[in-house]
Image (cartoon, helix red, strand yellow):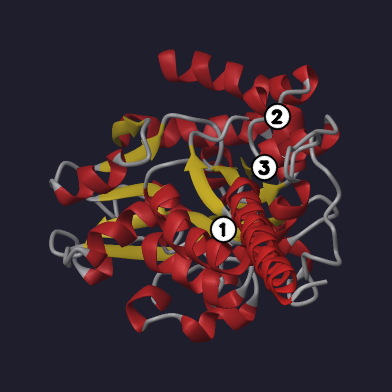
Amino acid sequence: MSESIRDNRRNFLKITSAVGVAGALGGIVENAGAQQKTIIFNDSGGASAKAADVAFGIPFEAETGHKLVVTAPAEVAKLQAMVLAKNVEWDVAELVSQEHRLAIRKGLLQPLDKSVVDTSNLPPEGFDDYSVAFAFYSTAMFYNTVKVAEAKRPKNWKDYWDVANFPGRRALRNHPVDNLEFALMADGVPPDKLYPLDLDRAFASLNRIKPHIAVWWKDGAQPAQLLQDGEVDFTSGWHGRFFALANQGEKRIGVEWTQGMLKRSWAGVPVGAKNPKEAMKLVAIMINPKNSAKYAEGIAYISADPRALQYLPENVKAWVVTIPERKSRMVIANEDWWLDNLEAAQRRWNDWIAS
């Protein structure tokens, strides 16, 4: 073989090798782009969705390379329809209170992959075989600290019902959930003896407070606004809404945690989810203590992992409900009782509120 032929062959091999490597690299880059997934977390919306996007979306993308999109609202009926149609749009679903129990009963959730989702640092009320409680919050009692003197601030629901000794305009939610428990505690039922709820006794107690309720609120943002605007002096409400106002500099909001209803929002992976591996990773990220604390900075809701508390700023720590002393004063809502009895309780409430 002549020298010129050898040189030409060497050049050809160099060129074809370079082309092959470039082609291979191009294929890798193209495949990497194609493999990036969009993972859907269906959330209850509002401040929760904004907090989730920051607290969970950023670390999820950093750890997996996949993008997180947060949708809303959380609806177990839609989840069931998607599972039955075998066309599940959500990779992780938020399930609030008794809807979480309903999803499990109907077989809508996959078992947790414990090799990915570490629940070893969560107390029993913070997880089950199918989901984790990523957001503990409370329906508590709030008051206007300027209009209501310290001695006239209710310390429990019995005080709230006592309009003679604790005068002022009051608001409650137009719904049986929480109000039945409040009414029973106001009537002297110990918090650990509430369930099963005695509906006759609860409505008899509600009859006593009904004439003194200035507003029956319906929307979660309403009670905080009522208090801020001075329309009421006392109200029940979901504490994240009041935290938002306090975080914006509103100094007239006081809170009484005693006998508040401790609530849970759960996260689970639906049966038929398109990206179950990535979904389980997202659930794990949601209960990571640092990420959970970051979520609390946006809405004051937090997981049950006690390690998350050490990462909280002081202004946020004053509002989270898993602080042991605060949590011990509250009542964990019985999701199974409400799932079994909500329909009957709602019918009776509708008749009562209209009478």
Secondary structure of the residue carrying tag 1 is: strand
Give the quarter of the image for residue 60.
bottom right
Image mark for residue 88? 2
Pointers 1 and 2 in contact (C-beta within 8 Å):
no
Residue 118 location (% of width, % of height): 78, 70
Image mark for residue 341? none
Q: Locate the N terminus by quadrant.
A: bottom right
Distance CA(mark 3)–CA(mark 1): 18 Å
Judge whether 139 appears above or below 40 on screen: below
Q: Report the residue at 38% width, 43% height from top.
A: 46
* Front residue of 246 and 254: 246
**Taking 327 as reference, is 131 left or right?**
right
Q: Nearer the viewer, mark 3 or mark 1?
A: 3
Task: Say what amino acid the circle numbered 3 marks.
Answer: Asp
Residue 263 location (% of width, % of height): 58, 52
> Is residue 355 visible to us here?
no
Image mark for residue 91? 3
Image mark for residue 135? 1
Secondary structure of the residue carrying tag 3 is: loop
Judge whether 185 appears above or below 75 on screen: below
Residue 150 location (% of width, % of height): 24, 71
Q: Residues within 10 Å of mark 3 (few under 14, many from 20)?
A: many
